[in-house]
Image (cartoon, rainbow, N blue to C red):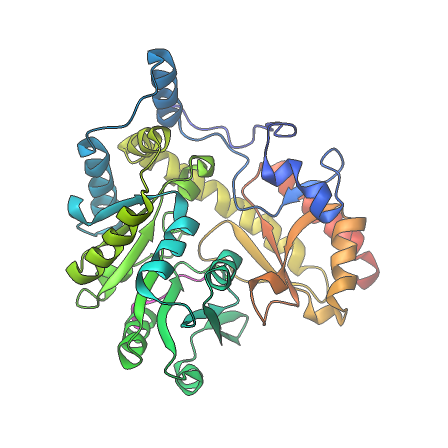
Amino acid sequence: MTAPNFDEMINRIGTHSAKWDAMEGIYGVSPQEGIAMWVADMDFRPPACVQRAVEAMAAHGVYGYWGDNSAYHAAIQWWMSNRHGWQVEPEWIFTTHGLVNGTGLCIDAFTKPGDAVVLMTPVYHAFARTIKAAGREVRECSLALENGRYEMDFDAWDAQMTGNETMLILCSPHNPGGRVWSQADLEATAAFCRRHDLVLVSDEIHHDLVMPGHTHIPMAVACPDQPVVMMSATTKSFNIAGTHSGNVIIADPELRDRFAGRMAALGISPNSFGLAMATAAYSPEGAAWIDALKTYLDGNRQIFDAGVNAIPGLRSMPLEATYLAWVDFSGTGMASADFTARVEKDAKIAANHGETFGQDGANFLRFNLATPRARVQDAVDRLQAAFGDLQ
């Protein structure tokens, strides 16, 4: 495999990129002058094996219905076994239009209107949005911020339960905090679900993007006796989110039957480009690319954290997984509107607003580090200038 060039600056402006073409309307940051660090996709091309798969489809020129999932299922089985120590059977696999769609299907299959769904917040904002849109209630269980990192707080959460809760969505690894949950964390989560009779859904879309020195444990491996709905995808790992493909993998027969019923009732089937790209990505070449990517992202993380943590009042949460830095501005004493204005108007950086991740996110912004290193350094320089009076 030719070494990927993650330093290449690829102009995404005017390519229907949500990350670059929508940021001026949302944040007031011009893409010509600013840096897009909000939407969670990468400014890198996927591995060459993925590009070849698309080129082969284009060369054939016929885009009919996809048939014969055997190679696709085999690729998923190979990847989960070799990269995550998880043995998956083909009949467990459902392909959805991405994992936000997968989340919506889980809500539809395993809860009813008026039920509450438990989230450990702050957490990925699409969960709450989808829950509320489905006529369910969000039960926010606040993660405890201890020594600059998030910890689970089951004693507090037990006291919050009303009996109306029917499902818990775990984000593992955690977005936006970048935590890789431990075996003990996962066992405690499973026990919490059993105590309160909750269907456990584990969104593990970031499971391939783990920093050196940390190891992700799939919930299905950590707690093999716990019925769990596992959600995974190639989209974050290989920067192919535009394919809107993901997998909901369910070993438990009862949960699997309920989910299959909703898939059938809604007539959901995958698109052929997503399946072809995923099959190509889940390969030895794709694995080598991921290993190179993780090394590069770790370098970006080190540069960003060193630069941001040098600014008095700012603290970037230690990143164990994902490429999303969660920066705490509470030490500045500023209101969120004030520090956000400095980031957007002075530094000209578009970053996700922390309050969209839940009730405890107001003092934070989330920054996407999956971009060429020169741009990460530029962002650091801009932030240091924007908060220069604090030096």
- In the picture as drawn, the residue positioned furthest to the right comes out as 389
- Asked if residue 140 is among those painted magenta in the image, a careful observer would answer no
Give coordinates of residue 99: x percent, y percent: 40, 49
Q: How many marks?
A: 0
The answer to whether 187 appears left or right of 46 in the picture is left
What's the magenta bit mostly, secondary-structure-wise? loop
Near-viewer residue (299 or 240): 240
| Residue 294, horizontal then vertical, whole percent | 43, 44
Q: Is residue 193 visible?
A: yes
Quarter of the view holding residue 71: top left
Which residues make up the magenta segment?
179-184
Considering depth in this image, is 272 or 193 the residue closer to the camera?
272
Q: Is residue 355 left or right of residue 59?
A: right
- The quarter of the rendered structure image containing the C terminus is bottom right
From the viewer's perspective, is 281 left or right of 27? left
Single out the residue that lies furthest toward the front: 265
Quadrant in which the N terminus appears: top left
* Relative depth, front residue between 32 and 388: 32
Task: Please provide percent x and percent y for residue 80.
Answer: 24, 46
Classify residue 370 as left or right of residue 118: right
| Relative vertical location of residue 237 with respect to residue 61 in this rendering, above or below | below
Residue 95: quarter of image:
top left
Q: Is residue 198 above or below residue 9?
A: below
Percent x, y of residue 97: 39, 42
Q: Is residue 49 above or below residue 355?
A: above
The foreground one among 109 and 300 is 109
